[in-house]
Image (tube, rainbow, N blue to C red):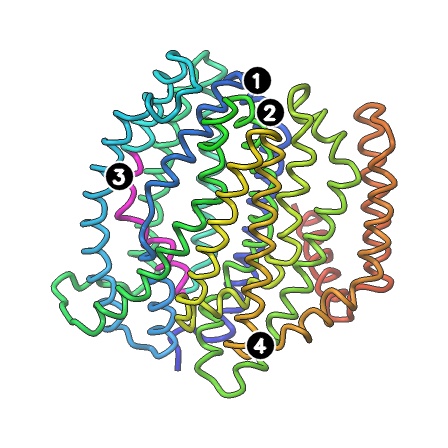
Amino acid sequence: MSEINEEESSRQIKAGAVLGYITIGINLLAGLIYTPWMIRSLGQGNYGLYTLSVSLIGILVMDFGLGAAVTRFLSLYNSKNDREAANNLLGIIYKFFFLLDIIIAVVLLAVYFCVGSIYKELSPAEIHKLKVIFLIASSYSVLAFPFGTLNGILTSYEKFVQLKACELFYKLLNMALIIAALKMGYGLYTMVMVNAVTGIINILIKLFFVKRTTPVKINYHYKEKKTTKEIFTFSMWSTVVNIAQRFIYNIIPSILGIYCGAISISVFGASATVEGIVFTFALAINGLFLPKVSRIITQENSEERLLELMIKVGRIQLFLIGLIFTGFLAVGRDFISIWLGNGFQNAYICILLLIFPSVFELTQHIAGLTVTATGMVKLQSFVYAAMAVINVALSILLTREYKEIGASISVCTAYLFRTAAMNFIYHRKLKINVFIFFKECFFKMGVPLAVSLAAAVFLSFMPYKGIAYFFIKGGGFAGIYLLMMWKSGLNAFEKELFLSLFRKSTNFLRRN
């Protein structure tokens, strides 16, 4: 019997999802108000340099699959109630983390001295700024790297409330301090420093929760070849996946920096921010299910139970992501004008291209978690490696002529390839009937989605007439979408779920 019973698991998932959506609400407000204000305060060029610095460090700083190994193996051991194996595992993984941290520090230092040679399109002043913020951000990354296990520990023990509360607090604190710093006249360097300080505070709080809410007692003296080999094999293939993922969003700003310049980077960076919000929306639910999936695969009829869970979660995700995609199609041009102003018109097309694959990929995330839980990451790594090659090749070909739009086309194409290839693995290797999944999700919700898509296309051609008109148009479209889904898309369980959330929200507001 697992240490974590199903009732407590469900409570943590529900509460974690609520906190996750509150964090998403904060992220949406940040995207609508905070991000454009920050861009104006810093200047479009400085924001582009900040995006470039973050993406460059994102390429170089990776945990080589150890973070995924923590979540996967701890979830497996917890499903078997094997606390000793869990503590031994962490002892081995922390040794790997400290060794990698030293190597990463050396690599970052070498890149620091080569920045000017890599980004020849940037001016000497921009190179100087980039080197300063790169030094600050990379120093924080080296300091924070050994603590990359904390999220995996909290997730595997299903401490979703604590994990999501940390993320919410970090976001609020980070925004508050950056707003204060920029209001006081400080600039780019201070903003990067604030990111580092709030990141350290977040680590300390997570450490506190790990100590107080989990039975973890790391055995640093443990040595065992079999366990080490299992971790190494899983981490090696997970590393291929991580590297491939970094050749999507993290590599694009560098390619744009080589061929286009800071302005194109800022447009793509703003577009990627919106895609990140969509991903966060899905992760608010999907990121909570790995321990549950790990338990299911050890039980009888696991394929049927996984398909049932995949359909249940996938339909809710399709409802949400469908609203985001069609809604942005309807009012996205107006939104960009209000949100970012002149100079970002191409972001509308970029955002549509970036979030379109999410309609398919994020609804199937339960199957993706099953790949991790079963340790079938070798096959996944082949798919992701091919995806990365497609993205880099297309980006180099398309960005020279089409700049940020060309980069977005390459990302969209690579992601669609990944989704198609992973569906083959889900069906053939995991024995999950993806045809039934698509029938229950996309086919049964197809009519309201098609009507909403047609309405969105029609509304997208209506000219912008001010902020009030934007809200009227957006509200009208949302009404059409929700009405169509309620009438012919959602089933009885989903309707009751949304009504229950609505009743709880209204009762909470009345009490307060």
| Mark 4 surroundings within 10 Å by alpha-carbon count, few (fewer than 14), some (14 through 19), many (20 or more) | many
Stretch of the chain drawn in magenta: 140-157
- Given the image, on which type of amino acid does mark 2 rest? Pro
Residue at screen point 46% across, 25% down: 178
- Given the image, on which type of amino acid does mark 1 rest? Arg
Q: Is residue 10 above or below residue 472?
A: below
In the rendering, which numbered label is found on residue 142? 3
Residue 154 belongs to the span the image colors magenta: yes
In the rendering, which numbered label is found on residue 40? 1
- Given the image, on which type of amino acid does mark 3 rest? Val
Query: Helix, strand, or loop for circle 4?
Result: loop
Circles 2 and 1 in contact, beta carbons < 8 Å: yes
Q: Is residue 259 above or below residue 418?
A: above
Seen from the viewer's position, the closer of residues 180 and 408 is 408
Cα–Cα gap, marks 3 and 4: 40 Å
Query: Helix, strand, or loop for circle 2?
Result: helix
Cα–Cα gap, marks 1 and 4: 48 Å
